[in-house]
Amino acid sequence: MSVVDEQAAPGTTAKDVVAQASRRRTFAVISHPDAGKSTLTEALALHARVIGQAGAVHGKAGRRGTVSDWMDMEKARGISITSAALQFEYRLGDTTAVINLLDTPGHADFSEDTYRVLTAVDAAVMLIDAAKGLEAQTMKLFAVCRHRGIPVLTVVNKWDRPGKDALELMDEISERTGLTPTPLTWPVGIAGDFRGVLDRRDGTYRRFTRTAGGATIAPEETLSAEAALDREGDAWQQAVEEVDLLAATGADHEQSLFLDGVTTPVLFASAVSNFGVGALLDTLVGLAPAPTGVPTAEGASRELTDPFSAFVFKVQAGMDTAHRDRLAFIRICSGVFERGMVVTHERTGRPFATKYAQHVFGRERESIDVAYPGDVVGLVNAAALGVGDTLYADRPVTFPPLTTFAPEHFAVCRGRDTAKHKQFRRGIEQLDSEGVVQVLRSDRRGDQAPVLAVVGPMQFEVATHRMEHEFGAPVELERLGYSLALRTDEASAPVVATARGAEVLQRTNGEYVAVFSDKWSLRVFKEKNPDLLLESLVAAEL
Ligand code: G4P
């Protein structure tokens, strides 16, 4: 019997945990920048009525309010760097689902951050721009989903604007991702003349009505096929013919194939007009998987009804400039989380008191009293917690470490003000445990000149900005000529260090990392020293 049963407090029996988990849908929207991720997030929240008017979530310059974008730099650039989670309830039929939408940065330079967020979701929504089709970043993120076995739902956005042909887009998805697209809805009206969708599941027509500026939920009307033909004429007829073609090519939804990552259900939408957004929520609730047991580092599974467990997928500081706090975001894997409970921090074996637990979405925060598998909780003042750490109650568990990407850019970081060496050290430690940059050190370089290693150069900008503005330790970076990083070990390190154009550094956890200036010098060295350990790290594009 599980400890959850033994506690048997109201709402915490094993049956309750399973029931609560089964109504949860935890997912992230992945897209190339500008495909409409922020707009869709707004629209989803609007549908669930967590915010009164679209616009409260989006943080782009010139829009009102900022919830998901928080840093000055983000505002200035109009990009979303940080991630947080938005939770809302959504009613479908007799069930009220709990939606956890995890925000991901769109920019390729922060793909490591996105990857970590994707460790915490059960499904992903791949958003593509109808005019642009699959773009570089969409492909990378999609590869991450495939690697992690995350089922993907596809939304073709911006159908209100001229774009590609719908069938052509389906071909592109299948050719470039290897996934078979199984459209659930099909647009009535070509891109740029979006009238509604043919619902392939029952053959009806969902007709949209435009609202002023897309600021409120677009009313939908459901019409029969005959009524649709009367109303839309050729546009309906064309949709019917194309849907017949799809049926002939076997593009029908089959749940097991979707869950196995063989197919991707497709919906058509216009996030800015709130068209098709209700259908997306219905689909998420109807088809996306609920949380299940999570594999552990020991090769077992932590089941939903086991005692509480969670892992840290993101650590972030300075989200609220008024309070210089540090938040650790955890994804709950099993059991019940109750605010105030004392759990064990697996890495140190120390107790961790969860007095301040919050739902966090950008600047918006509210206290959480209880949470279930699939939920994301922000733990405040979590100075001891680092990315990838496990927390548990009662029965110990360790979740597998999160993958770090192979960095491709390297720079020595030095404080510009020697009097600020304490602030410098604290800042570097913080950025390291948050995973903002990878911090590499060596005896030769010393503690005052660590090497920062990143996947995308914009991470350097974030680190420099934060060192100065958050930690009061202005720094200068000196770029190094390395472009490759490999895993090595203590035995190989002294020899690798003698290689031409190479250097050996260490992560804070003691792991040895060898950096090389180019593939050529690495190859020459490897040929001469075949017995040394030089293993690839996971590449950002997998
Ligand atoms: P992102 O988070 O993926 O980067 O994209 P974001 O939502 O910021 O959207 C990028 C641009 O695309 C925005 O325009 C947004 O209004 C527009 N957009 C999003 N969804 C749709 C859609 O369904 N149809 C159309 N026509 N446009 C859409 P912008 O010019 O950058 O900003 P703004 O001037 O609208 O504020």
Image (tube, helix red, strand yellow):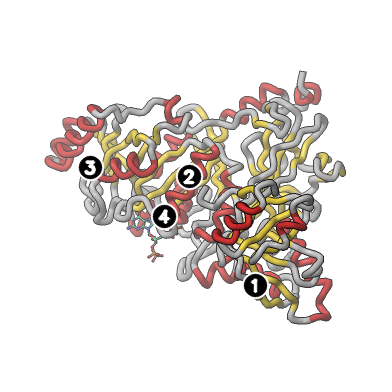
Which disc is residue 477 wearing?
Answer: none
Picture coordinates of residue 517, whole percent (x, y): 60, 65
Crowding at mark 3 (Cα within 10 Å: few <14, some 14-19, many 20+) = many
Which of the 4 image quadrants contains residue 508? Answer: bottom right
Residue 429's place in the image compared with 329, above or below, is below
Q: Quadrant of the N terminus?
A: top right
The residue that label 2 is drawn on is 143
N-terminal label among 1 and 4: 4
N-terminal label among 1 and 2: 2
Picture coordinates of residue 32, whole percent (x, y): 43, 55
The residue that label 4 is drawn on is 136
Q: Is mark 3 on a helix, strand or loop?
A: strand
Residue 26's place in the image compared with 138, above or below, is above
Amino acid at the residue labelled 3: Val
Please tell me which residue lies in front, 224 or 169. Answer: 169
N-terminal label among 3 and 4: 4
Residue contact at pointers 3 and 4, CB within 8 angstroms:
no
Amino acid at the residue labelled 2: Ala
Q: Is mark 4 on a helix, strand or loop?
A: helix
